[in-house]
Image (spheres, helix red, strand yellow):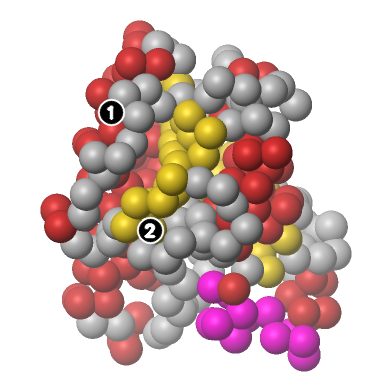
Amino acid sequence: MNSFEGKNILIVGASSGIGQATAQRVQAAGATVFTAGRRQPAGIQSTHLTWDATQPAESDLSGLPDTLHGLVYAPGSIRLAPFGRLTLDHFQEDFTLNVLGAIAILKTVMPALLQSKSASVVLFSTVAAQLGFGLHSSVSVSKSAVEGLTKSLAAEYAPHHIRFNTVAPSLTDTPLAQAAGLVSPNRLEAAGKRHPLGRIGTSADIAGMVTFLLSEESGWVTGQILGVDGGMSTLK
C-alpha cells in the first residue's frame, strides 16, 4: 500500500467500527489524521473536531488544514422495520444522517479538497441498495441517494482530479450492528451462511478497501460503487 506520508485525511465517524479501523490504518501508513464526530476516537492520535450530522450548522470545523487529501464519511444507521411501522420522521432521520450529513461536510471541506489537486472521497452505501431486502426500505432509500451523489460528484469533479467512490458492505460485525442485534452469537452462523464466502464482514475487511480508495494506488478509480460483501450482491 502506498505511503500516506504528507497526506491530510479527514475521517467523519471514527469513534468505532469501520471509521476507527480506517483511521488506524492510514495513520499507521503515515497520514496526518483529522477526525470529526460527536465523540473523540480512542486509540487514534488525531485533531478531533466536534461535529453532529444532525446539526452541521452548529459545528465548528475551522481546525481543519487548508489542504485535505482524503475524506471518509462513515456515519450510518441500521433501521430495520416493516414499512407500515416506519414514519416520515424515520425516513427523514436516516436521510439526514446518511445523505445530508455527507453533503454538509462536503460543502464545508470542498475548498480544502480542491487545494490538494488530487483528493479522494469515500462514502458508504449498503448491499441492500442494490438487492431487495425486506424491512430495509428506509436505509435503502438513503443509501441509494448516496450512490447517486457519488456518481454525480465524480463526474463534476473529475476535471479537478477529485475522486468519489462508495463502498457498499453487506452485514459487518461493528458496534452499530451489534446494537441492532444483528450479530448476536446465536445469529452469527446463520448470517454467515447467507454469504457465498461463508461469513459476515469485519471492520478490517471494509477498512482495507477504504484505505485502497484513499491511496494513490486507486488513482484511476472514480464514480464506482464497490461491493465488499462476501459475494452477496453477485453470487448465488
| 194 versus 160 height, above or below | below
The disc at residue 110 is: 1
Q: CA distance from mark 1 to mark 2?
A: 18 Å
- Write the residue at 49% across / 34% down: 9
Secondary structure at numbered mark 1: helix
| 108 versus 180 height, above or below | above
Badge 1 crowding class, 10 Å Cα cut-off, few under 14, some 14 to 19, many 20 or more, is some
- Residue 9 or 192: which is nearer the viewer? 9
Residue 2, position as x, y percentages in the image: 71, 22
Q: Is residue 86 left or right of residue 122?
A: left
- Residue 165 or 215: which is nearer the viewer? 215
- Write the residue at 60% across / 86% down: 181
Q: Quadrant of residue 86?
A: bottom left
The disc at residue 145 is: none
Query: What amino acid is at disc 2?
Result: Gly
Q: Give the magenta part as a residue range.
A: 176-187
Secondary structure at numbered mark 2: strand
- Of the two numbered discs 1 and 2 on the same chain, state the one appearing first in sequence: 2
Query: What amino acid is at disc 1?
Result: Met
- Write the residue at 61% across / 79% down: 178
Q: Is residue 140 left or right of residue 193?
A: left
Residue 151, position as x, y percentages in the image: 39, 31
Q: Is residue 184 magenta?
A: yes
Identify the residue position indicated by label 2 in the image: 37
| 27 versus 172 height, above or below | above
Position of the N terminus by quadrant: top right
Residue 104, position as x, y percentages in the image: 23, 46
Residue 34, position as x, y percentages in the image: 45, 42
Residue 222 appears in the picture as rendered:
yes
- Write the residue at 45% across / 61% down: 40
